[in-house]
Amino acid sequence: MPELAAPSALRFEHHPAGRPVLGLGTATPRLSWQVTAAPDDYSQARYELAVTRGNTTENHAVGGGEQILVAWPGAPLTARESVSVRVRVGDATTWSEWSEPAVAEAGLLNTSDWTARFVSPRDIAGLEAPAPIVSGAIDLPGEVVQARLYATAHGLYVARINGERVGDEQLAPGWTAYRHRLRYQTHDVTALLHEGHNDLEILLGNGWFRGRLGFQGRRAIYGDRIAALAQLEVTLADGSTHVLNTDGEWTARESRIVADDLYNGQRTDLTRAEGEPTPVDVLDADLSLLVAPDGPPVRITEVVPAQSVTTSPSGKTLVDFGQNVVGWVRLKVRNAGQITVRHAEVLEDGELGVRPLRTADATDTWIVGEEATLEPELTFHGFRYAEVTGVDDLATEDIEAVVVGSDLRRTGWFDSDHELLNKFHDNVVWGMRGNFVDVPTDCPQRDERLGWTGDIQVFSPTASFLFDTAGFLGSWLADLAAEQYKDGSVPYVIPDVIRRPGPATAAWGDAATIVPWVIYQRTGDRDLLERQLPSMRLWVDKMAALAGQNLLWAGGFQFGDWLDPTAPPADPFRAKADPDVIATAHLARSAEVVALAAEVAGDADTTREYAELAAKVRDAFAREYVTPDGRVLSDAATTYALALQWALLPDAEQRRHAGDRLADLVRTAGFRISTGFVGTPLMTDALTDAGYPELAYRLLLQTGCPSWLYPVTMGATTVWERWDSMLPDGSINPGEMTSFNHYALGAVADWLHRRVAGLAPGAPGYQLIEVRPLPGRALTRAAARHLTPYGEAEVAWQREGGELQLDLTVPVGATAVVTLPGQDQTIEVRHGRHHWTLPDPYAQEEQPAAEPSIRQLMDHQPSWDRIVSAAAEAGVAADEAALADRLKPFLDAPATQIVDAATADGFIPGADRFRTLLENA
Ligand code: BGC
């Protein structure tokens, strides 16, 4: 039996374990830890925290089993205070060893801790002018023992001390709702300073603050002056402290970066001399908006080498990095002259496909006089290909792609024996990496890159599995609450740069309720949920007000089931699913979520109020949109999926009927996806829960267009915005919006984790793990692994030799409820490794039904595949989708009539040939 291990991975709030946290933003940080091994019968009954502050250590013994986000035990920290914490845990009889210490240092917790002021160049650094460098200096009369730089900017900043870059953060200070919250960073700069004269220089860029932002072409949304705020605090060996503040004494000069913009790129003239020092102005900016980061900064997370350098049909030099990434190009050049690097996600006719970038130039240019390594600092691009001009004899080893993104800790993995599916999952991960660039964005490449609420609403479950997103999304939710209108309307994008008054649209606004609920489920962060509760309520109140007396939210502006594949490329608003049905369904769902959240917060009145509202909305929904038998308006897959998954169908018979109808819609669409942003994340769950898991698998593994795997067959390395961002003939979808890096449709990965592999949260923070694997005939194995707050959990199944092997790992502190495939009762198991051997439910070949109907024939995939190819060969129907569409009215007819059914609408010349082919098959 394993012994009780000392706790590990002790951490403050959502900051990563294992390295000191600098600039902690709260005086009472919550603590979490893991225990990697314990005796089988171990349950934590108590813990003890040893908190060392200065020379004293205080011990706090606490009874209970909590180990995730436990309350800070002592007096609140003061600004700059450093603290070291250790923990040990025990059951009633034994204590573990003490953990390694975890160290944190508080940031500038109060506005009054700031003595520096924002400074902005007075005479230079206009909107069209070169990026400025502001600088100050400090003389230090002794040996430096500790130094901290607290800094931020209006715009982007890169600080250098004595010529050395400070820290490894990119695109700092990141993007928040600047009118309400501006992040500052805390850097340990002890090693960069020395006795005597020291220079601090800060390069400023336009960034989100003053550059182009949004598709309306606006600039300077937050202000027309870029500015720096820096407070350098140094402690010398003699104990004295010395501070360098940005103030009126600082100077500003022009850098060699002559233009910089996130969308357009950076222009740099390395042959140009930097400007002469000019004065700065001290700005009267509100320092109470400053906040410390909750999540990790943007960093360089990987460097991808070039795969090939080739010449395009028109003679351009093209570099392929083999992966659609977000970041920039690093390039070694040996010749002088002008060098231009253009970026694109795809090629069209062998040339850079830049139309999807719309008005973003995405071009970096350089004027160089000598050998140099070039790499921009004040921009980023979304690209797989680069077109390089002006470099002599460019070789693959001279150029690489630098990948940037929020440096989130990876926490989730999925694997199976299906290569395309694994590649798809990889693409989901890459899509997330490219779109978690401080803000959860829709896309990273065109003139948009905004925090679209609907996109993260549907993707947050997947995101929370793949990476530790609690700090990142918690910060974004604080922005959402800050920018929510007083009447409850939620801006379409957060940070809100569209600023349309009274924005309220279903599925997008519901980010206010659903994202906090998802984070709570996945991390157990109850404080965050309680903090968001007023915002959640307000959004539901807004929807309820829009719905009015009858509780049906109808009319008004809606995005609806955005990018339903049957909507015309130029008009994504024309989805099959009625937007009113979607809107009322969301009102019911969000009211329910508020009731649940209020229950967690211990607010019984609010729970009752919103549970009642949810119930009434469900009744209204059923009355208006559902027939007594269970047909749901507008008879679209999305509306069935919503109604089924969100308990909008009052009786079991209706639910059964709706499930059957959804299954038929899948069949008659030729087992291809037919939903947009709203329905897609729910489809596979809805089919599975309705008793059609094999149809969910058919949808999942479909490769025809539209489907999840179609882009993979087209060489995609990220998830696309549209099911057919690239058309089967290799041309780019003619629609205005055609990104090749949008995470929303990748939201099905959550189903892969929770159901295909079978690793789902059963109680907040995975304290209870719901293990319910769903083996399918099409896969021989699947596995999901997740670093839960308690530690590593894994579920893996494999079908082989007539048996199904199931392996499960449960971390200490968590329990798993296991539903074995093919069995109804559940088994509860505790921490440790568990194994089951069961009969393989798919050991036998799938048998077609005796005297099948056309529907049953379609469900028998081997038969259906034969029929589809016969129909194609005979010229009856080009593909599965076309054939299924013809068969739509005949699903109940005997399969023997399939030829007549498929050719019923006219004189299809191939009918006889089709019959012959089928007879011989
Ligand atoms: C974005 C989407 C977003 C949508 C609103 C688009 O331009 O790229 O992902 O949700 O607008 O419907």
Image (tube, rainbow, N blue to C red):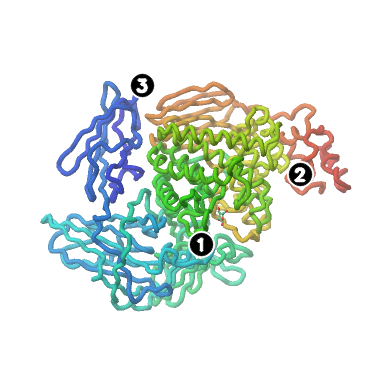
Query: Residue tagged by mark 2?
Result: 885
Which amino acid lies under the numbered mark 1 shown in the image of this protein? Answer: Gly
Please state the horizontal and vertical placement of residue 723, each as a whole percent of the image. Answer: 62, 51
Instruction: Tell me if the residue at label 2 has its CB under 8 Å from ligand 1.
Output: no
838 sits to left or right of 377: right
Labels 3 & 1 near each other (Cβ < 8 A) = no
Crowdedness near tag 1: few (<14), some (14–19) or many (≥20) residues, C-alpha within 10 Å: many
Query: Please, what secondary structure does the residue beneath circle 2 have?
Result: helix
Work out whether residue 1 can be spotted: no
The quarter holding residue 553 reads top right
Query: Residue tagged by mark 1?
Result: 214
Labels 3 & 2 near each other (Cβ < 8 A) = no
Mark toward the viewer: 3 or 1: 1
Which amino acid lies under the numbered mark 2 shown in the image of this protein? Answer: Asp
Is 336 rendered above or below residue 792?
below
792 sits to left or right of 350: left
Query: Residue tagged by mark 3?
Result: 41
